[in-house]
Image (tube, rainbow, N blue to C red):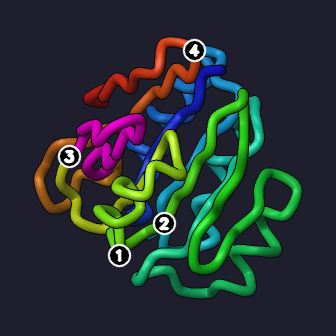
Amino acid sequence: MLVGIMTDTHENMENIRKAVDFFNKKGVELVLHCGDIISPITFKEFDRLNCRMELVFGNNDGERVFLVQRFREKGTFHVPGWESKLDNKKFIMMHEPVGVEALAESQKYNYIIYGHTHLQDIRKIGKSLIINIGETGGWLNEISTIGILDTVKDEVKVITL
């Protein structure tokens, strides 16, 4: 299964458009957004995705009620995080990296995915792959990144937009 990963888009419509185009071209089956979308206006671009989304709220997300309403047919927002089993792999996603080390040490999850820091963090602890692709918005580090997780190969690739 190919899973698209993005975080901290911070309403950068151009980068959201580029990410959506890339995910559609690669045929991802699901996109995970680790928070800080910011406002419902971004749905205009996210609606072009050819797959569903799972999303978590970030500390900067406003208009949460309207975000949930706008995205309701494209994806689901989760508070404080999202857990699921897909392709026989256990996922957990959150915005802030609270407890990432403990989650990895528990070996309960194959993929621990987070955002918030705007810094890349890709590492493996036992069977757990920790993934922070950096920032899709590119406002803080001037580097806009997304990720593609291949659950069959058990690897993630970070793509610079």
Disc 4 marks a residue whose amino acid type is Val
Tell me if 120 is positioned left or right of 97 in this view: left
Q: Residue tagged by mark 4?
A: 152
Q: Position of residue 8 (x, y in %)?
A: 37, 61
Going from N to C along the chain, the mark reached first, 3 or 2, is: 2
Residue at 46%, 75% in the rendered image: 58
Going from N to C along the chain, the mark reached first, 4 or 1, is: 1
Q: Residue tagged by mark 1?
A: 98
Residue range of the region highlighted in magenta in the rendering? 121-135
Residue at 13%, 49% in the rendered image: 142
Going from N to C along the chain, the mark reached first, 1 or 3, is: 1
Q: Quadrant of residue 130?
A: top left
Q: Does 116 sit above or below residue 17?
A: below
User: Which quadrant is home to the N terminus?
Assistant: top right
Q: Residue tagged by mark 2?
A: 94
Q: Residue tagged by mark 3?
A: 120
Helix or strand or loop: what does disc 4 sit on? loop
Q: Position of residue 135 (x, y in %)?
A: 29, 52
Residue at 34%, 23% in the rendered image: 157
Q: Quadrant of residue 21?
A: top right
Q: Position of residue 24 (x, y in %)?
A: 63, 22
